Amino acid sequence: MGALEISQIRKEYGILQVLKGVDIALDDGGFLVLLGSSGCGKSTLLSIIAGLAEPTSGDVLLDGKSIVGVHPKDRDIAMVFQSYALYPNLSVARNIAFPLEMRKVPRADQERAVAEVAKLLRIESLLDRKPAQLSGGQRQRVAIGRALVRKPKLFLFDEPLSNLDARLRSEMRHEIKRLHGILGTTIVYVTHDQVEAMTLATQLVLMHNGQVEQQGSPSQIYDRPRTMRVADFVGSPPMNFISGKVSNGRFRGETCPIEFDYKGPDGACEIVMGIRPEAIGVAISGQASAIEIAADVNLVELTGPEQLISTRVGGQELVLTAPSGVDVSPGQSIRLSIAPESLHFFEASQGMRL
Amino acid sequence: MNTAWIPRQAWLLALPLMAVMVTVIGYPLFDTIRLSLTDARLIGSTGNFVGLNNFAKLVSRPDFLQALSTTAIFTVVSVSAEIVLGVLTALLLQQRFVGRTLLRALMILPWALPTVVNAMLWRLIYNPEYGALNAALTQIGLLEGYQSWLGQPQSAIWAIIVADVWKNFSLVALISLAALQAVPRDVQAAALIDGAGIVQRFRYVTLPYLAGPLMVAVVLRTIEAFKVFDIVWVLTRGGPANSTRTLSLLVYQEAFAFQRAGSGASLALIVTLIITLLAVFYARLVRRTEEMK
Amino acid sequence: MERRSTTATIFTYVAAIAVFLIVLLPFVWLVVMSLSPAEALTQKPLRWWPSEMDFSNYRQLLDYTEGKGRDFLSALFNSLRVSGLATLLALVIAIPAAWVVSRVKSMDWSLSLVVLLYMLPPVALAVPLYMVLARIGMLNSVYGLAAIYLAILAPFTTWLIKSGFDALPGEIESAASMDGARLDQMLRLISIPLIAPIVATAAIFALLLAWDEFFYALLFTSGVQAKTVTVAIAEISGGRETNYGAIAAAGVIAALPPVFIGLILQKALISGLTHGGVKG
Ligand SMILES: Nc1ncnc2c1ncn2[C@@H]1O[C@H](COP(=O)(O)OP(=O)(O)OP(=O)(O)O)[C@@H](O)[C@H]1O
Ligand SMILES: [Mg+2]
């Protein structure tokens, strides 16, 4: 019960166009993650869905019914804010019960609902405290609890984990995933964090400059980025790009001595080739059909399970990841192997996938 | 900020305030303007329209010019003294010494003392026969014979200024002290490490933080001082020989003692105009101080 | 931090003692006078310290059965009623107005207007106010005076309280509205409780201001039923009373509430002063 459809949403503040016609569709029970750089309009879109801001034009449908112009309290949508927005003067229990209290739910039912939510979020022991007496992660849980207690059709999360430390983040991430599994409520979730985006989403939307760059499942976005921008934004370290020309069926790198038979889609002759760092291997000779190139190692950074190797190929820098066992050191010359099927091709002028 | 959830009728919440302001301030102001163009009396005659006659007569009246200069002297001298003494005291209260907390706490006392009580206290101190000032000054030999501080035109205005400064320099000191405490520790330390001298430190580290709040204090105090009524009323009622009669007292006399409502109203409007000009001038100055930051 | 030279230390202490004496001596003298018998204050040379404490001035002023005491006590009581009433009403109208002005951008002008009106000198309004009060029979009435004080207190309490609402994170109110709170519920349960300290500060400022007011009180009240303590003090010191001790005692009593408040709530008051001021 909570299919969301956003069509042609525009939002202008004076002459500033923040959203420029956003279309998003999400099935009931889906987990949609909005990913995009700072200032691209994610929070604005969320506020419009919540009813805290009105769109300049466009429509938002929840379960097929337009909710534009409906007061936030009547939309059956709950939100978890980045700052949590807990009521500092009320106890945790009263914070969680607040939406029910406002909806005149009988006291006994309120208490039952609060107890249930508290159990689900494992905060039973905190109910009598004030928000100021809680840690960041605990506040986060209370904020989620306050959203859960209403059993809304749709949850909105605006960067809910960005104020937490790395460890707590991953813990809460699992928690949210678990809750989504249990409740099955539709969720729209804003984040900067790719790991959050990839692990939580059933649908991932990449926004840029007030527009949707691509919507799709995480694997679609990762494996078949529609634009260079998406390819660049998703994945860490980011994809390597090599500009080049295609002529007579051969790709020639512009700034680096890379050359191979071009088997990608036809179209432009000025193209950009993309290759993810993990798709580049340190060559073990004899691999058939691999493209091999010579490279000089610039820098080796150990991240733990793997190492980031920055290399130089002609005038081009290529970053790759390799298992920490591979023994390379700066200054060394190595050979890189690239599987042709892992290459992405974009036309140079617009950056669209070929 | 997102405000779509705020109901359109929310402005109604400001309605009571607006209503009060319109009835108790807007309407009287408007009526003062109307009265200023008549020769109405406070009680009885509602008066006839006389155009700008009241204003024309006023500006050439010596008592108006005298009141204007008395008010100006009072304002300029007391506000400058309050600012200088206030800032110096605030700088002192920044230093470390035994009893600093106590002294800081005591600074609120003159400010909290009601103006009328302050005036009454100084009236007792200035008493020509039994006052503490006369007694003290003669006993330590600074004064030959008892003076009538408030009874002589040369000294009365200064006596009033002293009483006013005593009460209000503490306010300036408190505001300045709060501003000084907002100067970040590390900025002070950095300036010290960079070898800035005491004058440079004041100029480049302290002053930028002090300027804004101090400017506001100057504005508030100037406007207050220009409206001065109560302290003068209690100390001298404008005497001796009208030497301490400020503009507000003159309006009071004209409109209430002599019941010349029309003429009093026009005088009041002149005072209002001057204060408005002062406020506008200061608003500019404040903006410039802020831009300087 | 910095190491100080001996001369600087000596200078600091000399200055501190001077400030200490300048601030405190007039107060001490006021209290000493109020506790001195009448003759002690009219001796030459002046007796700086009475041989014995004499509480008769206070006793007289606080004795309701006698004329002097009745006059003074009713003035105190009137002041209490006028400032209490005006402050209460000012808060009632200032809190909602402050909220709107803080939240609705298009209401900005109204506050500037209110502040501008607030700067008007009382003399600009006094004559018509007098005439109106006379016409509706509210001269010499606690309620008439309170209505005027209300107009003085409301703008600046609005101003101060607005700065409190400004500092309140918008997300909290957004959350409340999504949770289903009506505007009145939101204000009552969430927003106002969160700025309670500022409301309290505003109330104290309002009380002090009303307690201190003299000009309107002088014009609009004269009889026992409405005359405030400031008017009473001005009358006493203006010649009605020849016992200086009694004058001083009246001053001490009138000054006690604000001085007491000032000392106890110093922190809140100073932050209010700088807040209201700097935000301007
Ligand atoms: N009330 C407003 N008035 C004017 N401009 C606004 C307003 N709210 C947001 N903007 C502008 O709209 C743009 C998008 O803001 P938004 O908060 O939606 O970005 P965001 O994608 O959530 O960024 P972040 O990741 O930093 O939270 C920004 O450029 C912002 O300055
Ligand atoms: Mg945002």
Image (cartoon, grey):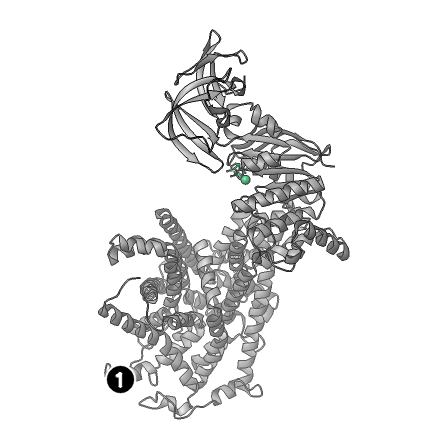
Front-most of residues C152 and A129: A129
Is C250 above or below relative to B20? Answer: below
Q: Position of residue C217 (x, y in %)?
A: 51, 70
Q: Quadrant holding ligand 2?
A: top right
Residue C264 horizontal side relative to residue B94, left or right: right
Q: Viewer-proximal residue, A262 or B162?
A: A262
Left or right position of A7 against C12: right
Q: Position of residue B204 (x, y in %)?
A: 29, 52
Ligand 1 within 8 angstroms of badge 1 C-beta: no
Q: Chain of mark 1?
A: B
Q: Which residue is mark 1?
A: B138
Image quarter of the C terminus of chain C = bottom left
Question: Quarter-wise, where is residue A101 in the image?
Answer: bottom right
Q: Does the rendering let one see residue A238? A: yes
Residue A353 position in % (x across, y down): 54, 19
Q: Quadrant of residue B63?
A: bottom left
